[in-house]
Image: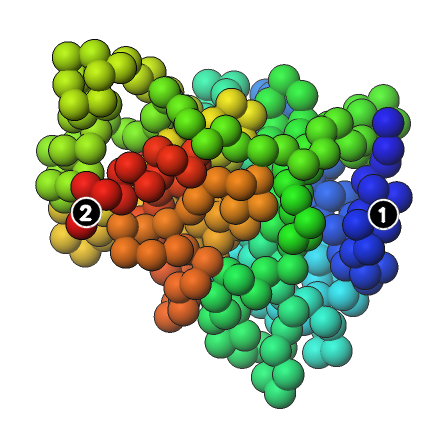
């Protein structure tokens, strides 16, 4: 079994990017350890604070954010970071080559039930001619990502990573502290009979999505003439991991529940990195209007509609919008 650094060198990933990835993973190993300690870690509760998006911060959100932020900003490789838990971007080394966006702990409502959570990250090159404290550096479309990944803190700690040469899985060997390559070139099956959506929002979705899901739920009695299964982990990392492993369609569609918030998932540190991983595994990742990675961001905390997964099923879903 190969360790991560030689596996990345084999893919001709530049040495400074390999070092940066190893830096991100050093923080993730520490988060994995704390998550694995459960209540013994002493960081399982909620704080009294909310992040800029009005969500109550859990202690583990704050600790994970601090671990990633400190190690990245000290590394020298990074010009700036942006995080779900930071109001705006944070400057690092003015001469750093890369910028990193991350969701330090995705699915944090799962913390208290000892269920799946994870860290999602996206790496781009810093554009020329902007100072490290300029958040506009992050307003690049997802196609500019040079690396994206997530670390899933489950029964095993698993890294899904792409540098644009396929999506690969690594498993943390907790006895040695190294991520080992456990599956090269993961492929999302083109066909699926499984979908993931928060069905309690169904009445707030736009008509095309309601019609599409109604046809899945109707099973053999409906237009699709076969049964579909449903799964919802309520942590995007968990749901996307399942899609990478066994196919499926995952969606957090536009809804009218709160007119000020038509979408839920964040473009920079949720939708873009997951789109890169899914596309590199042969799947599709779109909004009802186009490819997510081609969107020009306007805000670092921008939210976006997400429909991703098995190619033929995503195309089927989109056909309801025509
Ligand atoms: O980060 C947002 C998030 O927690 C995702 O990880 C997850 O897919 C979604 O929200 C869950 O939403 P809901 O609480 O509506 O099920
Ligand atoms: Mn999240």
Q: Along the line of sight, which residue is nearer the eye, 32 or 319?
A: 319
**Residue at point 62% right, 87% down?**
129
Q: Which residue is mark 2?
A: 321
Categorize mark 1 by other alpha carbons within 10 Å: few (<14), some (14-19), many (20+): few
* Residue located 40% across and 24% down the image: 192
Q: Give the camera-side residue of 123 and 154.
A: 123
For image coordinates 66% across by 44% down, the residue present is 166
Q: Which residue is mark 1?
A: 10
Query: 295 or 220, which is in the foreground?
Result: 220
Does the image show residue 6?
yes
Which residue sits at x=72%, y=71%?
Answer: 97
Considering the numbered disc 1 on the image, is that residue within a helix, a strand or a loop?
helix
Regarding residue 62, the answer to whether it shows in the image is no
Q: CA distance from mark 1 to mark 2?
A: 42 Å
Please provide percent x and percent y for residue 201: 19, 33
Question: What is the number of the mark on residue 84?
Answer: none
| Residue 159 as seen in the image, left or right of residue 305 | right
């Amino acid at each position: 079994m190969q360790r991560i650094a030689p596996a990345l060198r084999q893919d001709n990933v530049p040495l400074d990017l390999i070092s940066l990835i190893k830096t991100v993973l050093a923080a993730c190993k520490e988060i994995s350890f704390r998550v694995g300690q459960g209540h013994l870690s002493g960081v399982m509760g909620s704080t009294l604070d909310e992040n800029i998006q009005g969500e109550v911060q859990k202690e583990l959100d704050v600790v994970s954010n601090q671990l990633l932020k400190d190690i990245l900003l000290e590394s020298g490789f990074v010009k700036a970071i942006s995080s779900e838990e930071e109001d705006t971007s944070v400057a690092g080394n003015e001469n750093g080559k890369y910028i990193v966006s991350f969701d330090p702990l995705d699915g944090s409502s799962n913390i208290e039930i000892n269920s799946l959570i994870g860290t999602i990250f996206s790496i781009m090159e810093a554009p020329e001619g902007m100072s490290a404290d300029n958040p506009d550096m992050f307003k690049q479309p997802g196609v500019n990502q040079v690396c994206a990944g997530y670390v899933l803190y489950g029964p095993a700690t698993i890294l899904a990573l792409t540098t644009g040469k396929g999506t690969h899985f690594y498993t943390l060997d907790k006895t040695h502290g190294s991520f080992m390559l456990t599956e090269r070139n993961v492929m999302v099956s083109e066909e699926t009979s499984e979908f993931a959506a928060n069905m309690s929002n169904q009445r707030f979705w736009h008509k095309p999505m309601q019609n599409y899901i109604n046809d899945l739920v109707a099973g053999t009695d409906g237009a699709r003439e076969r049964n579909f299964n449903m799964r919802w982990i309520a942590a995007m990392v968990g749901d996307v991991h399942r899609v990478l492993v066994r196919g499926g369609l995952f969606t957090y569609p536009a809804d009218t529940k709160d007119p000020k918030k038509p979408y839920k998932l964040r473009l920079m540190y949720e939708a873009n990195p997951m789109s890169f991983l899914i596309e590199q595994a042969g799947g599709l990742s779109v909004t009802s209007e186009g490819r997510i990675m081609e969107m020009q961001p306007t805000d670092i905390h921008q939210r976006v509609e997400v429909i991703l997964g098995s190619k033929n099923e995503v195309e089927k879903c989109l056909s309801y919008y025509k």
